Image (cartoon, coloured by chain):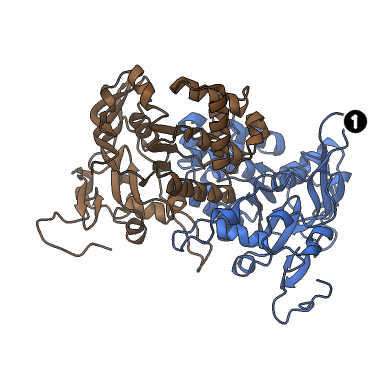
Chain colours: A blue, B brown
């Protein structure tokens, strides 16, 4: 066993994934206290993240992907549904000790490296503070050595010099590495990375994506990678969840989703990804429109207004995720399963 | 036919206590009427400063150190504020990076459009309203949003409202400073297509600054790659994507993942752009260059024509020996 403080014995069974959600839902009431308007930010998400797995959540602004991350970070309480971490139900974590136990294992890395690090302290401050709070067994020299170790792991070398810098002395890419170092100091099991590269120059994004892959390899952490860029999701992730209007519309192994996207929205995301090696695939009409604010939704597919292939049924019946291939599912009435896949010829439709 | 915009030997200094920092160094540019020119480079390479210099928007501590900017036959550098007011917005306009900050949160879209029009022309209220509705329709926004405040619009709509504002007087040139960088991929793509369509419809020229080379691949006619205040490479866009000559251009092109084909390890470009107060000796890119020669740290390369492109790199032989093959 590790020296880690475990409030209760870990996962009850070997088959339990690291993190699992069932019908996870978060609504926000809009307007005044008598308002009947309810925004459905996240609806009925059931997902899993395995050990040493990188899962990407892909969607546009307003798709609910950041709300999902905040639910998993315990920053929001679910309206409905459950989150299990290593077999433990998150709602059952009540004491400060239990909540710290969770936060230590599931830290978050934020989008904006310019505002998420306190500018008045040296960058060592955040790392040392995490170590003091969450790993009190490390003292003096050992704490310092651990801070240097995590800085080296994220590529901030020479670590001793880097720790002494102020945030303004660092580039955006270096600051984002500080964010990962702070998370890593906690010996996390799962890092929630909310658009960690979208504020960075294209030329340094690759370095941060490679860092995430290296953290999984070397430190054994899992990563939930939130992004609007499906190309970077493919680059780094094992599995992809595509979100639209608070729903997961497609999920599967990254290669399968990219090679054979089943949902028209995934197809749109792919068409919009700029690829100079390919001719322009779409005109503005195809990508026009924006994700809906889902307020008091009625039955029906939330993508219907932008969907090029919608049929009558789409406006009346909400499509559920159904299996279309190995580990691959889509929530679309018209999505066809892989040839030979059981349930390939769907009834209804 | 003379170019619509001609920039010659333009240099911009930032005057600081620790000495002058040259942010833009001897830049030459030409933009023909109706042309789409993209300027790409990392943060801190001087591309925004260059735009500001072209638009005569430099303010202390930045100062034009040398060079000329000729726009539609007028020498912009010598024009005074009063004369500039007749050219600005009517003949050329600027779309700023962040619509979030560039629009006034306290005023409706129509009030902001009206402000702009009154500052640069004498028009009746009716004519202002007509034109404001017209340009909004042009960028695909329903004119009912004239009454909206910026916070009531989505990020993509705000950015399109900014472009509508730039088109109020049907200018000949629209200068855009990373107008899409705050948007997600789908909204970026929609906006780029829209800019291109408007450009074809109305015939204005575009100077477009971005750090994301992949974004402009299908839209720009010519591409200028800037590094550390200087032009590293300039060529027709298709030519530059097909065969980038400068190692920096190659690095930028290899920095983003593809959605097709086998997954390759991306290296990006190691290190970061130099501190312009103390630029490295020789070639400015040499400390980050994977194919640098010993000579590169000693001799500063000049911008030189190498079959169809202008490139600033010592890897390419001096034209004295005819048509030697380029190193891979």
Residue A217, percent from left and from top: 59, 58
B49 over B107 or under it: above or below: below
Which residue is located at x 53 percent, y 27 percent? B127
Between residue A186 and residue B274, name the one nearer to us: B274
Using residue A1 as the reference point, say whether residue B74 is left or right of it.
left
Q: How many marks?
A: 1
Between residue B243 and residue B52, name the one nearer to us: B52
B98 over A40 or under it: above or below: above
> From this viewpoint, which residue is outermost toward the left?
B320
Chain letter of the residue beneath label 1 in the structure image: A
Q: Which residue is mark 1?
A: A34
Using residue B323 as the reference point, say whether residue B153 is left or right of it.
right
- If the image is split into quadrants, where does the C terminus of chain B sit? bottom left
Between residue B245 and residue A245, name the one nearer to us: A245
> From this viewpoint, which residue is outermost toward the bottom?
A340
- Determine crowd level at label 1: few under 14, some 14-19, many 20+ residues with C-alpha closer than 10 A: few
Using residue B321 as the reference point, say whether residue A75 is left or right of it.
right
């Amino acid at each position: 066993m590790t020296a880690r403080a475990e409030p209760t014995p870990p996962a009850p069974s070997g088959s339990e994934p690291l993190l699992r959600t069932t019908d996870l839902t978060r609504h926000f009431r809009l307007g005044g206290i008598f308002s009947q308007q309810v925004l459905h930010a996240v609806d009925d998400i059931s997902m899993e993240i395995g050990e040493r797995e990188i899962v990407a959540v892909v969607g546009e602004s307003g798709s609910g992907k950041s709300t999902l991350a905040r639910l998993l970070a315990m920053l929001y309480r679910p309206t409905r549904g459950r989150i299990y971490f290593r077999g433990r139900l998150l709602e059952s974590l009540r004491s400060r000790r239990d909540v710290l136990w969770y936060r230590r294992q599931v830290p978050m890395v934020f989008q904006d490296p310019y505002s998420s690090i306190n500018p008045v302290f040296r960058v060592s401050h955040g790392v040392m503070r995490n170590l003091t709070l969450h790993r009190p067994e490390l003292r003096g020299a050992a704490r310092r050595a651990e801070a240097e170790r995590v800085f080296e792991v994220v590529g901030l070398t020479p670590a001793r010099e880097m720790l002494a810098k102020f945030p303004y002395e660092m580039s955006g890419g270096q600051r984002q590495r500080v964010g990962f170092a702070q998370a890593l100091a906690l010996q996390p099991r799962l890092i929630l990375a909310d658009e960690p590269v979208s504020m960075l120059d294209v030329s340094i994004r690759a370095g941060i994506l490679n860092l995430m892959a290296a953290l999984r390899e070397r430190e054994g952490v899992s990563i939930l990678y939130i992004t609007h860029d499906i190309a970077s999701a493919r680059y780094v992730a094992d599995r992809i969840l595509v979100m639209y209007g608070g729903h997961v519309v497609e999920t599967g192994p990254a290669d399968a989703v990219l090679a054979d996207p089943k949902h028209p929205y995934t197809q749109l995301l792919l068409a919009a990804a700029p690829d100079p090696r390919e001719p322009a695939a779409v005109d503005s009409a195809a990508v026009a429109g924006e994700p809906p604010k889902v307020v008091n939704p009625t039955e029906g597919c939330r993508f219907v207004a932008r969907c090029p292939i919608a049929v009558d049924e789409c406006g009346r019946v909400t499509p559920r995720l159904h299996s279309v291939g190995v580990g691959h599912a889509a929530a679309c009435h018209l999505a066809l399963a892989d040839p030979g896949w059981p349930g390939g010829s769907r009834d209804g439709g | 036919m003379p170019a619509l915009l001609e920039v010659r030997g333009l240099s911009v200094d930032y005057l600081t206590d620790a000495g002058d920092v040259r942010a833009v160094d001897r830049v030459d540019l030409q933009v023909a009427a109706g042309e789409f020119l993209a300027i790409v480079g990392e943060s801190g390479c001087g591309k925004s400063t260059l735009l500001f210099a072209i638009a005569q928007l430099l303010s202390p501590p930045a100062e034009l150190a040398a060079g000329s900017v000729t726009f539609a036959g007028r020498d912009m550098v010598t024009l005074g504020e009063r004369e500039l007011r007749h050219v600005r917005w009517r003949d050329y306009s600027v779309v700023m990076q962040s619509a979030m900050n560039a629009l006034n949160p306290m005023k409706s879209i129509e009030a902001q459009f009206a402000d702009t029009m009154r500052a640069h022309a004498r028009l009746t209220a009716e004519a202002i309203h007509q034109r404001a509705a017209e340009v909004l329709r042009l960028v695909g926004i329903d004119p009912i949003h004239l009454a909206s405040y910026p916070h009531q619009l989505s990020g993509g709509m705000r950015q399109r409202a900014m472009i509508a504002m730039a088109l109020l007087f049907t200018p000949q040139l629209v200068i855009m400073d990373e107008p899409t960088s705050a948007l997600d991929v789908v909204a970026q793509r929609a906006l780029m297509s829209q800019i291109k369509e408007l450009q074809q419809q109305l015939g204005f020229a575009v100077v477009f600054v971005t750090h994301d080379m992949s974004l402009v691949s299908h839209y720009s006619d010519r591409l200028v790659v800037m590094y550390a205040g200087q032009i590293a490479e300039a060529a027709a866009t298709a030519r530059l994507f097909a065969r980038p000559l400068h190692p920096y251009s190659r690095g930028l092109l290899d920095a983003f993942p593809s959605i097709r084909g086998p997954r390759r390890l991306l290296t990006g470009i190691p290190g970061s752009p130099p501190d312009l107060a103390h630029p490295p000796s020789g070639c400015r890119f040499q400390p980050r260059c994977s194919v640098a020669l010993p000579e590169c740290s000693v001799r500063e390369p000049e911008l030189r024509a190498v079959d169809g492109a202008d490139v600033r790199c010592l890897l390419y032989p001096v034209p004295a020996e005819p048509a030697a093959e380029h190193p891979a």
